[in-house]
Amino acid sequence: MLRPTLFPFGREFADFDPADPQYATQVVEAILAEGRAAGASDLHLQPMHDGLELKYRLDGVLLPTAKFPAKMAPNIIARLKVKAELLTYHTDRPQEGRIRTPDTDVEMRVSTFPTVHGERAVVRFFGSSNKYQHLSDLGLPDDVLQSLRNLLGETSGVIVISGPAGSGKTTTAYACLREIAQYTSGARSLVSIEDPIEVVVDGVAQSQVNLQAGLDLETGLRFLMRQDPEVIFVGEIRDRATADAAMQASLTGHLLLTTFHAGSAAETVSRLLDMGIEPYILRSGLLAVLNQRLLRRLCECAKDSNDPNARLGLNVQRIPQSVGCSACRGTGYQGRFLIVELLVIMHTDLGRAVLSRLDTGELEKLALQAGMVSRWSRACIAVDAGLTPPAEVRRVLGFS
């Protein structure tokens, strides 16, 4: 009898019999339940020539969990598509759907894609709406927390939250919206246009992109301007048209929050300029850029190393290292934490630098001279505090 090949965890799948007519149903329910219980952000089902491989993304890292028999792969994917209300007979085209579970506040987004060995599926677990509600829950440094709160009190301008995919940008944006709603007691009109809406935020009139109806981010933003808004959240700037609309909104007396994919705060400014935003508009409309990354937090089983090479070139005094135990499932880590850098454009010489179209390196030098604490400095502080090892910093920030 064929059984799934098992990796560090996921042992419960061994009890399922592929000959059972309910096998696919049992597997799908179990992998979704285990993903939620483990706190995974994503679940990957990758068809291979010798089976269907299951991986969970825990704390930003993909961990192999199980490999199911190849002959059962179509049934498992089909069952997942049924739960997501997708068309099971369309196996040659990408599809997207959602799994809604009334008994829990966790929602799942399902994406399928055809590959040479069959359909691949990825499930994104949207976090609980009860976690990271406000800025004080995010673990931001005190100086950044206070500065960001002051910025949220502005009546016009753009605050960009940047970082790579999966760095928690939308979570931070939602916390900002709740902060405004709470401290203004509903006295400010808050609206959003998102793709998709990940969490419902009380006090915010949230709208979702609907391309079939002709409602994209740019169009939605332009129509929202007629809804008497004071604070606007645009889920993500993806193109010049959306960026133009966002900057224009900021110049007409609106505070606008948005997210953007960029590696650093200075790179965010440079990329907006490269998209074609006029420097004088960016100088006038951009308030600040909050760039963030997520580093894995060491489990209590961690130990310090005496090997100087383990510093990996970082300017740190302490060298904590991951070990692994039953509490952390052998990974050596439990949870993640933010490192951030906040680049404030207004009232600084950076505005003139933007007008001069200085490159990313020069912008970053000026930002550091103006008092910005870089992501690298924050990371080294975290290493010396024993929160994360140098290897994790290099994994997330690279070697540049």
Image: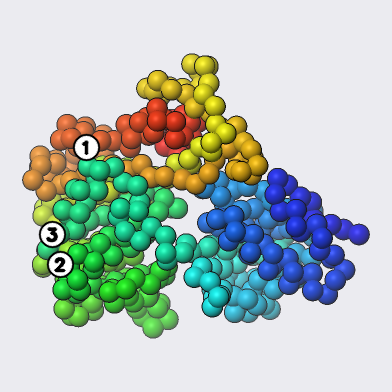
> Mark 1, residues whose alpha carbon is within 10 Å: few (<14), some, or many (≥20)?
some
What colouring style does the render use? rainbow
Report the front residue among 2 and 95: 2
User: Could you tell whether 82 is left or right of 242 in the image?
Assistant: right
Q: Residue at x 71, y 53 (%)?
A: 10
Q: Is residue 252 visible?
A: yes
Label annotation for residue 372: 1
User: Could you tell whether 223 is left or right of 23 in the image?
Assistant: left
User: Could you tell whether 128 is left or right of 189 in the image?
Assistant: right
Q: Which residue is mark 3?
A: 154
Res. 223 image quadrant = bottom left
Q: Residue at x 39, y 83 (%)?
A: 213
Q: Residue at x 64, y 59 (%)?
A: 34
Q: Which residue is mark 2?
A: 254
Tag 3 and tag 1, C-beta contact below 8 Å? no
Q: Amino acid at mark 2?
A: His
Q: Earlier in the sequence, mark 2 or mark 1?
A: 2
Q: Earlier in the sequence, mark 2 or mark 3?
A: 3
User: Could you tell whether 323 is left or right of 208 in the image?
Assistant: right
Q: Residue at x 57, y 51 (%)?
A: 57
